[in-house]
Amino acid sequence: MITQTPTEPTRTSGQPKIHRVEVYWTTVTYKTVIVYASLVLAIILAGLFVVFPNLYSKVINGVTNAVSDGAAGSVAIEQNQAKFVNLDGKVQVKKVNSVQWVDADYRTKLDKGDQIQTSGEGAARITFADGTTYTVKSDTFITVEENSMGHERPSSSVVSIKTGSVDLATPNWTSPDSKAAVNVEDATAQVHSNSRAAVKADPANKESEIVVKSGSAEVQRGQERIELAPWQKANISSGGPIQKSEVLAPPELVEPLNLAPIIVDNPKSSPVRFEWKPVAGAIFYTLRISTTAMFTKTIQEATKITGTSTEITGLDAGDYFWKVIATDAKKQPSEDSELFKFTLVAQGKSQEMLLQIDGTQLHGRVAEIYGHTEPGAALIVNGQPVASISPDGTFRHFTEALEPGPHTIVIIGSNRRGGTAKQPISIVVPK
């Protein structure tokens, strides 16, 4: 800022005095104006912060959210899309903005309004962004009704079944307001956190049902509301109230162990023994074997087994999946048991691998087993995978607590060449 005083002009003596108006001015630069304006604004904001402290944080958060939402927009679009993780047989999709059905593949992203249809030998498993999975069985037609997942907000996945059946499993949600549901006719089955359920729709007979396998669920139709616990079923029929009943639990599988290789001289003629635990109320069991995890094709089936074990022959070398269904005196079947996988291997030099048990040691009721195998091999001890195998092939495994008495522990290995090995060891847990 510069202040100047005007210069008084010279006059000679004798001249009359002239009255003048003196003008003073100040030169102000733009920089000075900006500095003073900023100072005034800072004083005003400081005053607002003292009087309204919450206002300041809201403004800052609003700006931050606006910036972050713009940056995360493309990520949110990808996260909100469901995708196929298993496809078996003929599965088709019709996108919401299309009139054409196309074959589904693993690159297909599913959005709200998309339709999925499976053939008589088709099946699919769909995973949503929050971890909820829907297994679409054969001859099923569904529509994705809802699929939302926001940052730190409840997630929601809903499908509607026009016809067929869907199994769904929910993860352990962090938000209690998250939901996964299946719509059938005019009812909704909402499955809670960390739960599994099976839902079926039969529009021809105007009947639907939901069976809870684990966790819990709620069925609602209009003002009706039914809570379901494990192995409870809700029957939903047109013109009548929702009926709740108990259902038969499926068997627990014992042998062959899940993921275990079975090594035999001649797979085609060698019997494979299957065993499961008895189910209260069951009068017979049905064993099914397939070469696919989705069970779109059953290659062996043994029905009306009155005991809890059977032997099957005629299987070629390869990978197989098996499950068991129980049936009660009213001829009502249980849901499918858990799915187990085994590999039938022909014994030969090409299948040999190194597996040496160096010793065992008891720690109370827990057995420690240590030895060495080939680098990169995989080991299973009594159905439990060995979590840590050193780069040189040495390993150490601790079993679960064992009951007192004699035990035979089976160690099964497989290498990258397709070779397998099996080592049984006997131990006695003292009383």
Image (cartoon, grey):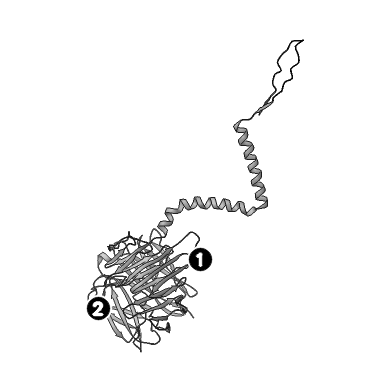
* Res 352 visible: no
The circle drawn on residue 407 is none
Residue 167 in percent (x, y) is at: 37, 73
Name the image quarter holding the N terminus. top right
Q: 26 above or below 422? A: above
Q: Residue at x 50, y 62 (%)?
A: 153
Residue located farthest toward the right when viewing the structure as drawn: 14
Residue 295 vertical position relative to residue 20 in the rendered view, above or below: below
Residue occupied by mark 2: 313
Would you say 69 lies left or right of 99 here?
A: right
The quarter holding residue 4 reads top right
Q: Secondary structure at mark 2?
A: loop
Q: Which residue is mark 1?
A: 175
Residue 135, horizontal then vertical, whole percent: 36, 70
Q: What residue appears at the point 60 percent right and 33 percent down from the top-left corner?
A: 31
Left or right: where 345 falls relative to 146:
left
**Most distant residue in the bottom direction:** 329
Instruction: Return the residue nearer the eye: 16 or 363.
Output: 16
Residue type indicated by callout 1:
Ser
User: Front-most of 369 and 335?
Assistant: 335
In primary-sequence order, the first of circles 1 and 2 is 1
Q: Which residue is located at x 70 percent, y 15 percent? A: 9
Label 1 vs label 2, nearer the camera:
1
| Quadrant housing residue 213 | bottom left
> Is residue 130 depicted above or below 199 in this figure?
above
Q: Is residue 44 visible?
A: yes
x, y percent for residue 248: 39, 83
Amino acid at pointer 2: Thr
**Is disc 1 placed on a helix, strand or loop?**
loop
Seen at 46% across and 69% down, the residue is 179
Quadrant for residue 377, please give it.
bottom left
Image position of 120 with respect to 105: above or below? below
